[in-house]
Every structure is written in structure tokens, then in C-alpha cells.
Image: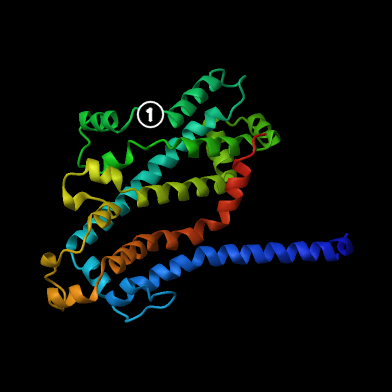
Amino acid sequence: MKKHYNSLENRIVDTLVLIICVCIFVICILPLINVLALSFSGKEAAIAGKVSLWPVDFTLDSYKYLLQENRFFLSFWMSVKRVFLGVIINMVLTVLMAYPLSLEVRQFPSRDRYMWLLIFTMLFNGGVVPWYFVIRSLGMLDSIWALVLPGAVPVFNVILVINFFRNIPKAIKESAQLDGIGPLGMLVQIYIPLAKPAIATVSLFSIVNHWNSFFDGMLLMNTPEKMPLQTYIQSLVIRISDITQSGLSAEQLADRMSQRTFNASKIVVSTIPILLIYPFLQKYFVTGITLGSVKE
């Protein structure tokens, strides 16, 4: 068996796969390096397209302008609160909904009916205007709950966890039932511990979704200080008249900063938290996707 694996054909295939993976990695990483270099480059070099993988005319002016206002830190804290509350609500409701829908029809006769309702909400919605009026009628405008409650049940995540639960061996379930464990105990003691890869995967999806969302903040938050970070960053433009706390005069800073470098600094700042979180969940990511995507 070992000799067959080390055959010439297998080594050629392994080499080709390795080359393809390296190419994909390079294709993915080069734009990120370019954006990072662009955020530290001067205005003339950015406009002339001279920036590739290394900053040209190194400067921190874009970051100075981005970080100088108190609103940045208020928006950052708002996004942190949104992610914290949103992920907790998403995960609690996802697990509580996925557990009964993963049972067999004889255990939950109405399973298929609820499943079709779930799929229907995934494919169709009432649109932005009814969505806005419902949130306004509930008195949630300009509050953190307007950002976390409308998307409290992510249907795609629920389906992923359902399929993962269905792949838990029946022998484990039957053994737990023989030991007298009830439905709640089954969920807490059996399903959740075994579903750590799936839960970590959908948690990452939820974190990224809440952190990157900006459109709902534009519609639902009326107070600028309550806007999440992505909404605040999207609303930023280079306004020379607003620059009062930098060490340079308005004219000097305008000469050294362009919209391209400023946009690059926005991207870098907004992606740092996700890049810090992802390595801790990455080991569960592939397992959660593959095991949760196969129906038993």
C-alpha cells in the first residue's frame, strides 16, 4: 500500500495539487498586501499607481485622520457590543431551533412543516420597507436591538447545525435515552459537546456578518454616536474642514493623503478584528462545513 502511494503518478498529482494551492494562496494574499501597502503610501504614489507590495513615501496620515475622532472609538465599541449580543442570540436560537428539527418525523411529527416554513423565509422576504416599518413599530429604532434582533435566526446556520445533529450516531442517542436523559439533557450533554465544530463554524459566520454589516446601521440608527463601525467608516470622506487635531495644517494633509489611501486604511482597520479571531476558530471550520453539509 505504501509503495503504491509513492508511485510516480501519485507524486505528480501531489505536486500539481501543491502548486495549485500555492497559486491560490498567492492570488488571495497579494491583494491584501497591496491594500496594506497602499494605506501607508503617499498621495502621489497612490494616484500614479506606483504602489505594489511595499509602501511608497511611507506615511500614517490616513490612519491619523481615521482614528483622530472620538466617534471612531464610540462606533468601535458599538460594533463590539453588537457582535457580542448578536452572536449569543444567534447561537442560542440556532441551537434551540436545530435540535427539534434534526429529530425523526416519528419523534417530531410537524418537523417537515416547520422546515418548509424555515426554507420559505430563506428564499422570500417582504423587502426593506416593511422590514423598516416593523422595526419602527416595535420601538427599536436607534437602539442596539435594532441591529441584533431582526437577524436573530440565521436560517443558513440553522440548516448547517441541523445536518450536523442528524449525523450524530444513533447509538449515542439511544444509549443516552436508556440512561434516562431527557430532551434538554440530551441537547446539553450530548448534542452540544459533539457539535463543537459546527457551532464554532456558524459562530464565525455570525461574527463576520455582524461585524461587516453597515447598511442596517445607516437605516436604523439616527444618532451618529450609535452607528456601528462599518457604517461610520462607510460614511467617512476626506473633509479637510473637519481636520483639526492632526499635527499638519489642512492644506499639508490634503497634499499627503488621497481617497485611495484613505479607503485602504478603512479596509485594514475593519479587517483586523476578524483576522485576530479567525485563527482560534479555523481548526473547527473545515470540519464543521464538511460534517454539517452531508445528510445522513
Please state the horizontal and vertical placement of residue 78, each as a whole percent of the image.
Answer: 26, 52
> Which residue is label 1 attached to?
125
Q: Is residue 176 above or below residue 221?
A: above
Front-most of residues 46 and 225: 46
From the viewer's perspective, is 290 left or right of 123?
Answer: right
Write the residue at 66% across / 66% down: 19
Write the residue at 13% across / 75% down: 251
Q: Is residue 40 visible?
A: no
**Which residue, as the protein is rendered here, is positioned at the far bottom?**
57
Please state the horizontal and vertical placement of residue 220, each as a whole percent of the image.
Answer: 23, 41
Q: Is residue 190 above or below residue 197?
A: above
Q: Quadrant of residue 241?
A: bottom left
Front-most of residues 116 and 110: 116
Tell me the kind of residue under disc 1. Answer: Asn
Write the residue at 54% across / 57% down: 282
From the viewer's perspective, is 81 left or right of 34?
Answer: left
Quadrant containing the C terminus in the rendered view = top right
Q: Is residue 55 above or below residue 86?
A: below
**Which residue, as the protein is rendered here, is positioned at the far front?**
48
Q: Is residue 228 visible?
A: yes
Q: Is residue 130 above or below residue 24?
A: above
From the viewer's perspective, is 221 left or right of 84?
Answer: left
Please state the horizontal and vertical placement of residue 44, each as a whole percent of the image.
Answer: 28, 76
Please state the horizontal and vertical placement of residue 186, each as a whole percent of the image.
Answer: 57, 34
Quadrant containing the N terminus in the rendered view = bottom right
Write the residue at 40% across / 46% down: 87
Q: Quadrant of residue 33?
A: bottom left
Q: How was the colour assigned to the protein in this rendering? A: rainbow
Secondary structure at numbered mark 1: loop
Other residues around mark 1 within 10 Å, as few (<14) / some (14–19) / many (≥20):
few
